[in-house]
Image (tube, rainbow, N blue to C red):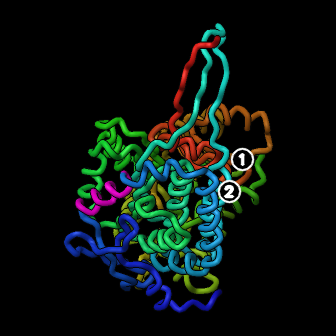
Amino acid sequence: MPNIDKDELLKSIPNQLFINGEWRDSADGSTLDVINPATEEKLATIASAKPEDGMDALAAASEAQKEWARTSSRYRAELLRDAFELVMERKDDFAAIMTLEMGKPLDQAYGEVTYGGEFLRWFSEGAPRVMGNYYPTPEGSIQVITHKRPVGPSLLITPWNFPFAMATRKVAPALAAGCTTILKPAEITPLTSLLFVKILEDVGVPKGVVNIIPTSSTPEMTGPMIADARLRKLSFTGSTQVGRALLKEASQNVLRTSMELGGLAPFIVFEDADVDLAVEAALATKMRNMGEACNASSRFYVHSDVADEFTQKFSKGMSELVVGDGMEEGVDVGPIVSAKQLASVEDLVTRSLQSGARIEVGGQRLDRPGFFFPPTVLSVDSADNPLLEEEVFGPVAPVYSFDTEEEVLELANKSQYGLAGYVYTNDMQRVIRLGEELQVGMIGVNSGTISNAAAPFGGVKASGLGREGGTEGIEEFLETIYIGTPRG
């Protein structure tokens, strides 16, 4: 573990808004406090943007858009590459601040630095590869020319659970495509994003191209921006409920939208699966980020032939995980991010028990400072149990036994959500069938790890619109323009 001076680190992170290339206080001097969820102590007080600050940021982005769009793709690529290099130089700082403000264990925070940094490198490499096309129509009468151009000023709203990776996953493709940006980080984890924007300032991103406006009053601040015709793109990661509200707002100006929303990922273990491998992956994908991940396994469907074995081994593995402050060595599970989120987890577990679930391990919050809930496994007999229908966003795993492939496919698909799914089987024909019929945007087969900067991340149904990462990620910030000319 690196020797990090917390006080010096916090001093190095800006505590103001960044608008049009300048760090400044909010319009009326409003502030918000950032709390360490492991200790409930205040980490920092930062500026909290007001509606007029949001409009100033939009004005700056709009003013800078024309010139930024005209920059060469190589120039944009080099800036992103420089940002990647500087992030890697300061990886200790990024990992530590994420753990302090969000709670994840430090080793997982380092993993997020690596993962998030790859979006800067990936899209730096993708910027020069944005190309159009040239071909005749089938009749031979028209010459078709297509080219790509940036959508325009983009509002990027990121969640609290992956404060670095979600920022880079949106900012990097936007900048690579030639779009100016306004980053609105989550109220409870803004420090990582502020440090990231400082990196972008340090590498020389021109004024107005990147703006950051943390706030404690998001709807009031973003509403006027979304209603303004100068904004041309909205990218949001968060709950389905908020996503639906934002889509309604965005419809007035027919904004391009990307929505990465809720998830309720099924983890399906068939009778022919390697149970030990499935348990290992279940622990990883359930407990990554304390279960506070949209693509985390949320409901475990296990074939009746192996259900007892899986539940026993899974429960044992969960019980052996060490809970504590993520800054301490040997900790596997940090705190829940906030008192509000902890209460939500407790409520869902209570309702699940009232519906007949049985606790195998865990089940009650820990009596200590901080927002701690232990790794929890519950056996569930009813397919309508709340834990199988609602996203828990915490270290809680319900296990339900099934008998047939048809049954589990119906159970998995009945959810409104469709972000990710995980399948454990050695039958490749079954893998193909499920790949065609499982209603999710991403499927992990005999693997609990699917996220990568080079792969398209996104879901179907109420889990969202569009894709982030992969070659698809930059397309979300580009428009295809067609020019037709007569063929002589």
Badge 1 is on which residue? 445
Q: Residue 472: x percent and y percent?
A: 60, 42
Residue range of the region highlighted in magenta in the rendering: 51-62
Three-letter code for the amino acid on which mark 2 is drawn: Thr
Mark 1: few, some, or many residues within 10 Å (few <14, many ≥20)?
some
Three-letter code for the amino acid on which mark 1 is drawn: Val
Q: Residue 181: x percent and y percent?
A: 43, 55
Q: Residue 114: x percent and y percent?
A: 65, 67
* Residue at the extreme left: 28
Q: Residue 217: x percent and y percent?
A: 26, 63
* Residue at the extreme front: 488
| Quarter holding residue 42 | bottom left
Badge 2 is on which residue? 449
415 within the magenta span: no
The correct choice, above or below, for 294 with respect to 91 in the image is: above
SS for callout 2: loop
Q: Which residue is drawn at 48% across and 48% down?
A: 260
Q: How many labels does the image show?
A: 2
Q: Which of 119 and 451 is in front in this view?
A: 119
Residue 350 seen: no
Q: Residue at x 48, y 40 (%)?
A: 465
| Quarter holding residue 289 | bottom right
SS for callout 1: strand
Mark 2: few, some, or many residues within 10 Å (few <14, many ≥20)?
some
- Image position of 10 (left or right of 148): left
**Foreground disc of the pair 1, 2:** 2
- Image position of 339 (left or right of 261): left
